[in-house]
Image (cartoon, rainbow, N blue to C red):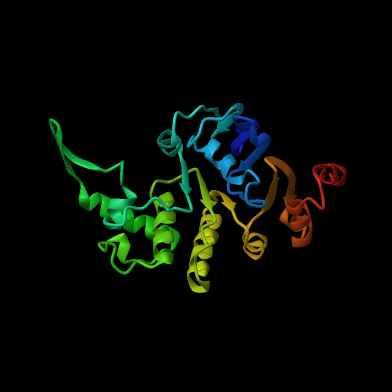
Amino acid sequence: MTDIVLKTEGLTKHYGGVHALDDADFEIRQGEHVAIMGDNGAGKSTFVRQITAVEQRTQGKIWFDGDYVEFDGPLEAREAGIETVFQTLALADDLNVPDNLFLGRELVKLKLGPFSILDYKAMRESTLSGLEKTGVKIPNIGNAIRNMSGGQRQCVAIARTATFHSKLTIMDEPTAALGVQETAQVENIIRTLKEQNESLILISHNMRQVMDLMDRIVVFRRGRIVANLRKEDTHGEDVVAYITGAKTQDDYAGAA
């Protein structure tokens, strides 16, 4: 049995005449943590939107958990086991933590025709379990999200991945708007996921974070993957050279 969790082959996305993503071959294995780096507009977020079916790919193939997949939309990808923490977080400000975690997939205790009685106790217990699993500390999970700090909100979004036993977690710049203390909390969650052998894709501009936490670094430039580097075999200056174009895909192929 293969331990490849996600594989893409020739993944491509065109918006009219704009080639936002071209021929991306990528894979991530069970328990592996992979960083995706590149300048703004390099194709990183476009790549994630194809994997999660936020958009439909122009061409290319995707395999997830051993099966060839063509997800109709992000809900289908999520149900298959891909949990994504987008920069926007996608949290409902007026709802509390359990209500946010189970939004769109509420647990039902009893169905009475068109009406349902929700199982708030089970959702609260699952929420507490997910928070414990990721090491997230929220003093009062009954508080509305709008009353929480940026770090707490980010941690709630990440805890959602643990609550539903995702097979792959994708984080898009999870610490970009956070202070030092809150960033450290998110990084501890990433370490916890690593200890639990869970696969993670991290989109980040933070070189220190990537070199500290990731196993491998995939660099995008102008819609193409130009380097696929194991952390122990490279250093920050090398990664920056690929990001800026000082080194090219030909340099990477030659080094390999």
Nearer to the camera, 34 or 4? 34
Residue furthest left as drawn:
112
Residue furthest front as drawn:
17
Return the x and y of residue 60 as percentages of the image width and height: 62, 27
Return the x and y of residue 239 as percentages of the image width and height: 75, 56
Q: In this image, 176 relative to 110: left or right? A: right
Quarter holding the C terminus is top right
Quarter holding the N terminus is top right
Q: In this image, 179 relative to 153: left or right? A: right
Return the x and y of residue 41 as percentages of the image width and height: 63, 47
The residue at 52%/48% (across/down) is 170
Nearer to the camera, 58 or 141? 58
Query: Which quadrant of the structure image shows residue 187?
Result: bottom right
The residue at 44%/53% (across/down) is 88
Q: In this image, 80 relative to 242: left or right? A: left
Nearer to the camera, 31 or 25? 25
The residue at 77%/60% (across/down) is 235
Give the answer, above or below, for where 12 lies relative to 136.
above
Nearer to the camera, 14 or 215? 14
Give the answer, above or below, for where 103 lies relative to 19.
below
In this rendering, the count of numbered labels is: 0
The residue at 47%/47% (across/down) is 84
Residue furthest bottom as drawn:
181
Residue furthest right as drawn:
254
Return the x and y of residue 171 as percentages of the image width and height: 52, 52
